[in-house]
Amino acid sequence: MVIARHWLDQEGVAAIMDMPGCAIALAAADLARDRNRVFIGSGASLLSEGGCALLRS
């Protein structure tokens, strides 16, 4: 998360996309939200306040 924090705070990045792994994606989503920036995730998991859950069809 050090790199993502640097991107948002120092480099002026407006959005973070497609972070690997659910735990990393949750942390990046929280970081982006705290800084009023965009996070766009992809993959087979649903991010929520309760953690990560696999999507079932």
Image (spheres, grey):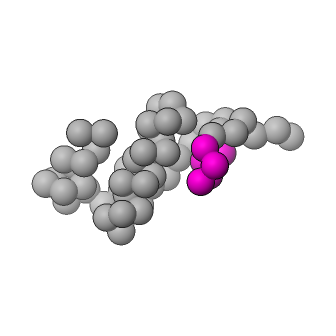
Taking the spot 49% from the left edge, 45% from the top edge, the residue there is: 26
> To which quarter of the image does residue 32 belong?
bottom left
- Which is the main secondary structure of the residues drawn in magenta? strand
Q: Residue drawn at (28%, 44%), measured in percent from left and top?
A: 4
Residue closer to the observer: 57 or 52: 52
Spot occupied by residue 36 in the image (x, y as percentages of width and height): 36, 68
Please state, as top left, top right, bottom left or bottom right, where the N terminus lies in the image: top left
The correct choice, above or below, for 31 with respect to 35 in the image is above
- Across and down, in percent, residue 41 comes to 52, 46
Q: Over which residues does the magenta segment extend? A: 46-51
For the C terminus, the quadrant is top right
User: Percent position (x, y) of residue 24?
Assistant: 44, 37
The answer to whether 41 appears left or right of 4 in the picture is: right
Name the residue at the front extreme. Answer: 50
Q: How many numbered badges does the structure rendering display?
A: 0
Q: Which residue is at the far left?
A: 10
**Which residue sits furthest bottom?**
36
What's the residue at 43%, 54% (across, down)?
A: 30
User: Residue at the top extreme?
Assistant: 21
Q: Is residue 37 visible from the viewing direction of this image?
A: no
Where 14 falls versus 16 (above or below)?
A: below
Query: Can you tell which quarter of the image residue 53 is in?
Result: top right
Front residue (pair 8, 49): 49
Q: Is residue 37 left or right of residue 9?
A: right
Residue at image location 60% in from the left, 44% down from the top = 51
Would residue 53 be seen by someone viewing this image from the given angle?
yes
Residue 29 placement, left or right of 53: left
The quadrant holding residue 37 is bottom left
The answer to whether residue 54 is magenta is no
